[in-house]
Image: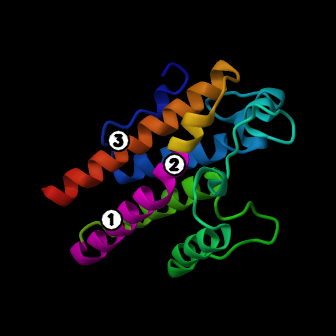
Amino acid sequence: MNTAAPLESAYASAAQRSAIYRELAKAFTHQGAQTSVFGICGADYANAFDPSVSRQACSLWGRTHTEEDQGSLFEELTRFYEYFGLGRDKNAETPDHISVELEFMHFLTHLECKAAGRTDELLSVRRAQRDYLSRHLSRLIRGIHRDLKGGSAACVELVEAAMEFVNEELERIDGDARG
């Protein structure tokens, strides 16, 4: 994980994990990829992740990596977001885009920071993180990882870094639930 070294967490603090989620969310957008730590040029990003540009591109939308009905998927994601007081800008990506899902985890880890010292609130936020990671984000990143058929080294590194981080997060949360 060369260029992604700033994304290494090894069970980092909630504030550090929040920043990693934010950086990953940015890197999974066409514009943000170029200025992210991954430095992915626009053409490479489009070739790897935009099916309208390349037949080999891997979709970044959850609906393409699940058997679940799109309406049900959108409804469940929207319920998650609305429960925490978040709405959708009319020009925003759909609720199942990887950047939106990563941004939501950035928000939840930010809430974790704010809940420090308040056990009930902290446990509630961590339950939401576990549910969201296991039901949505991990499934999406596994699908992207599985379906990525090449692309630039930077695009592959982005997907691998995201996959590694999400897996770490699931391990951390499972460890917290047991301990």
For label 2, the crowd category at 10 Å Cα-Cα, with few meaning under 14, some 14 to 19 and many 20 or more, is many
Q: Is residue 164 visible?
A: yes
The residue wearing badge 2 is 21
Distance in Å between CA atoms under marks 1 and 3: 14 Å
Predominant SS of the magenta segment: helix
Q: From the image, which quarter does the C terminus lie in?
A: bottom left
Seen as rendered, the residue at the extreme front is 67
Q: Is residue 58 left or right of residue 50?
A: left
Circle 2: element type = helix
Which mark is on residue 177? none
Seen as rendered, the residue at the extreme left is 179
Amino acid under label 3? Glu
Residue 145 x %, y %: 55, 35
For label 1, the crowd category at 10 Å Cα-Cα, with few meaning under 14, some 14 to 19 and many 20 or more, is some
The residue wearing badge 1 is 126
Q: Are marks 2 and 1 in contact (CB under 8 Å)?
A: no
